[in-house]
Image (cartoon, rainbow, N blue to C red):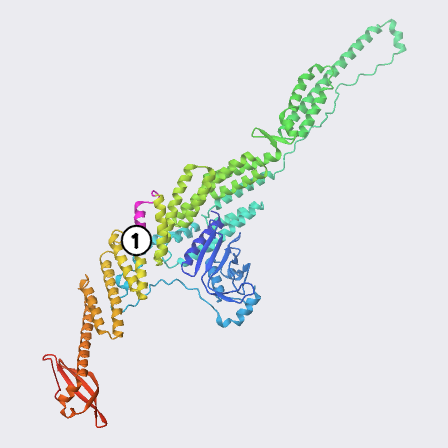
Amino acid sequence: MSMGSQQLAEDYAHLKEFLKLYPNITLVRTVGQPPDSYEIEYTLRGFSREGTNNVTITSSHRILLSLPFGYPHFAPIAKPLSPVFHPDFDPAAIRIADQWQKNPSLPELIVHIGEMISGNIYTVEEPFNPEAADWYRSHADQLPLDTLSLTDIEDTKIQLDSLADDTFASLGLEHDNFLAPKTNIDPAEIDSIRNLVAQNKIFSANKLLSDLPADAAFPDRDEIQQNIGKVLRKTDQLFQLAEQLEDMAKFDEALEVTDNLLALAADAPGAEALRDRIQQSYQLAQSAGLPPRQTAAAPDSPQRADSTPPLPPKPPRSKSALRLGNSIPVRPILIGMVILAFCVGMISLYFKDQNTISQSQANLLKGQLLLDKGQFEAAHAALESAQRSLTELTILRFRKSTYEQGIVTLMTSPQLQEGLKGNILYEGEYVSAETANALKELNVLSDQGQALAKENNVNDALKLYRQAYQLALNHKLIKHQSTIEEVIHSLELQQTLSMAELAEQNKNWEQAAEAYRKALSLSAKMQSLGTTSDITHRLTAATFRQDLDLSKKAFTQSQWQETIRFLQQAQQTITANPTVVSEKERRDLHKLLVNARLYLMLSRAREAYEAKNWEIAIQEYQNALSLLHSEPDSTEQLVGDSVDKIGKTLLMVQIAQMQEKVLVAEGSDNNEEVIALSRNIQQLIQSSTYSGDPSVQTVYQKIEKKIAQQREILNQEEKIRWLEENFEDIFRNNYPTFRGSRLVQPKAVFNKKIGNKSIYTLTCVEKSQGSSSKLELSYMFDPATGRWSVPKE
């Protein structure tokens, strides 16, 4: 993985963990592997305005963040996907450059944009949207509209009435019980990280540090993390600078930069391969830069050199010699001299022909040498010169055909004829010089790519093979294109599978599944059925584990419906492909699914209880008990005491439902119904297996006391009715003087109790002789004798 890709992958992993702290920021979609484009949704109150309509408050906003080439040295590009009415927003961009310069952190930037949307941050000087700036000035007292809150990890407490405790708190069924206990960090791991940093093995140290739990703390963790981050950013800069210098053919400077990079991070991925590649390019450049050896060219036409001296001029005949003819034989001397001259001439011609043949052979050899060097025009000229020389033979003309045959053979050779057309022999085929150079470069790239692939340096190998493919494409090397393309697909598949395996090691199942999908697409192009089958199997396994991982996260956040949905998806996956997971994973899935359903039932029961929707609450608690009894293996941690607690809570909810009816009867002064309903509650308790529980006994005693009170009230009402019906006899019997008076408007009220005896006050109005007066009498009932009497003072 190149330095830039590693930065993107690390930022993505960090961002996903970071956003878990902000429930109102959601990562909707990503593009790229690793991602270089993010779609973010904010569930925040912020101003929006469409067209010329009035400004309104909207609670959902989306933005797009794109990471450019050169990130993180260049700020991301932010664009709103939904209307946001803000001074620093326009339809095509968001002002974030200043924030990025202060703090080049992707997670912090996303939070910063959320603060902008909610009105916590805005700029009214040189705004993107002047109209929004004016609005914010005039409505500053309304800002901010919202705040970014961290996830609340505390469970809420539900207050119940005196008949039952809080359902979840009393049952001890908090979902935290399912979380694995925190593991302690081995000090040797921390020492190993420090040693790697000291040895400048920054990437290895960063890997070990990132593998530690996020909540694992040790004294200098933050300092080490910051130092590693600085070095990683610096190495990324140096890596890009070295590649740029390499592209500019500044190999000596590029080598110096790679040396600095390795000094900072000795284990930087791809750095050694980069340095070797630059070193090779540097050596090739030096070789190509040497002045070519100069070869003295023979003249096209040999200079004719006649080494035979000219014949001496014939001396003039002397009269004096003739006169001596009588004594010396002149004719034989003349004949001898003619023969001598002929012989000398023939010898001269012979040497001349020998010189011509030597010159022709020299040009033939020169032509061969020039042909071997690829100087075809010059070679052709030299061979023509050699052929012309042979036409000048005289006495050795019979040898012309012998020497000329070699010249003609060379002149008609495919090497020369193709060379004159601009073609050269390369790998057994005559091609153009341009094509031959392209093939040579193609072979160099392929050889280097193959060497890197053998070293498992897939990223750099891919880079070279893609350059080779583009070279073959540009020069229309069709038969090489398909071969290189197959190699590229193979390397891309290898790279993608490595990414998938790395994601699996980090338990990033979403990224693993995405990588396997890409690998499946690549393997389809390669038409490798075995590979496709294996990748399909691994993709299914990764998808299963992704759903299982998502379900666990939803479970820890008490999102029971989401947990069940993910688990059902995982269940469907293994139902269709039963061999992709182990039996233990299958059992774990079923166990988590049962527990999620249990918590969903208890959660619904609690919500129904709060709303006093007794029927639903009772039904959900009954469902929870049925589930616990039907799935003892999956709920082994909950069976026993938890079953008793849920059963007891169910009884309490049933009592609360009936007690509500009692309260309604009391409000209607229907004491007989109060007693009847209270007796039903007692019967419910007596028939329950929890009748002996102290808290249930307390409830029973409260109900018993209520029944006694209601009976006493009914008894008092009965006595009051009897007194008011018989008030005349009572007054006349106890006060004979009133026998002649008319008594009206009786009224009896309970007064007090003395022991078991109840004392009532009875009043009425006496009308006699046009006047009226109020009469009052205290009357006592003794339940032991069943008699009424006037109490003694």
Highlighted range, magenta:
578-591
Residue 164 appears in the figure: no
Q: Position of residue 691 (x, y in %)?
A: 18, 64
Quadrant in the rendering for residue 690: bottom left
Task: Relative to 761, say whether 565 is above or below.
Answer: above
Of residue 605 and residue 740, the one placed in the foreground of this image is: 740
> For this view, does 305 lie left or right of residue 488?
right
Task: Relative to 679, say whether 583 is above or below.
Answer: above
Q: Position of residue 456 (x, y in %)?
A: 45, 41
Tell whether position 582 is magenta: yes
Residue underneath mark 1: 594
Of residue 510 and residue 540, the one placed in the foreground of this image is: 540
Task: Relative to 612, say whether 369 is above or below.
Answer: above
Residue at the location (66% across, 26% down)? 367
* Figure label count: 1
Of residue 225 and residue 655, the one placed in the foreground of this image is: 655
Quadrant in the rendering for residue 648: bottom left
> Of the residues shown, which amino acid type is indicated by label 1?
Val
Q: Position of residue 380 (x, y in %)?
A: 68, 27
